[in-house]
Structure formats: structure tokens, C-alpha cells
Image (cartoon, rainbow, N blue to C red):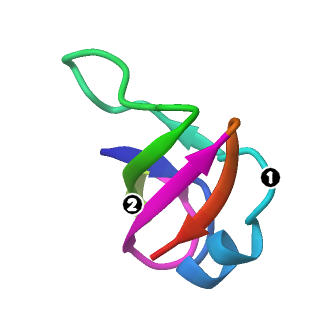
Amino acid sequence: MLVVYYKSKKQLKESIGTSLSYTETSAFGKEYKSDGKLIVSNRPHLTGLGREFFAEVTMKDNKIHSVK
């Protein structure tokens, strides 16, 4: 799971069309894909931002395409 730097899921949705601000957390290799679906979360104890949330982000050409 990628940790993202957004205060809320709403702020993440407002970032559609931009690059994803994230940190890799897996000990088993990179999880980020420039095209495809990613599972992300905001972990306030790590990022210092807002509330905890989880989301499915679809990426296209290194840009956020959709957020569920």
C-alpha cells in the first residue's frame, strides 16, 4: 500500500490530472504503477496530514485519472 500526502479523500479527488504525491512502504519492491490501479492510504501518524482514509486510484500516463 502506498502512503499518500493528501489531507482527505476529497483533496485527492481534486488532484485528478496531476501526479500522485506518495511514499512507497512495501519491503517487497515498488508498488507504484504509472498506468493501472493502486491502493493508497493517508496515515496521519506518518504524514502529519488530516484524517486516515483509504482509496483506489487509477493512474494513466503518471497522472491521477480517477479515485474511488
Q: Quadrant of the N terminus?
A: top left
Q: In the rendered image, which quarter is residue 42 located in?
A: bottom left
Task: Compare residues 54 and 32 and report the one nearer the observer.
Answer: 32
* 42 sits left or right of 59 in the view: left
Residue 67: horizontal and vertical position, in percent?
Answer: 53, 71
Residue sitting farthest toward the top: 29
Q: Position of residue 30 (x, y in %)?
A: 37, 20
Which numbered tag is attached to residue 32?
none
Q: Is residue 25 above or below residue 29?
A: below
Q: Which region of the structure is painted magenta?
A: 47-60
Q: Secondary structure at mark 2?
A: strand
In the rendered structure, the answer to whether residue 66 lies left or right of residue 55 reads right
Q: Residue at x 65, y 60 (%)?
A: 65
Residue 37, x across and y down, in percent: 41, 50
> Mark 1 sits on what residue?
18
Location of the C terminus by quadrant is bottom left
Residue type at tag 1? Thr
> How far is disc 2 from disc 1 in space, using C-alphas?
17 Å
Amino acid type at circle 2 is Ser
- CB under 8 Å between callouts 2 and 1? no
| Crowd around label 1: few <14 · some 14–19 · many ≥20 (10 Å) | few
User: Tag 2: Cα neighbours inside 10 Å, few (<14), some, or many (≥20)?
Assistant: many
Residue at image location 55% in from the left, 60% down from the top? 48
Q: Quadrant of residue 11?
A: bottom right
Q: Quadrant of residue 34?
A: top right
Q: Tell whether position 14 is magenta.
A: no
Which residue does the numbered mark 2 point to in the structure image? 41
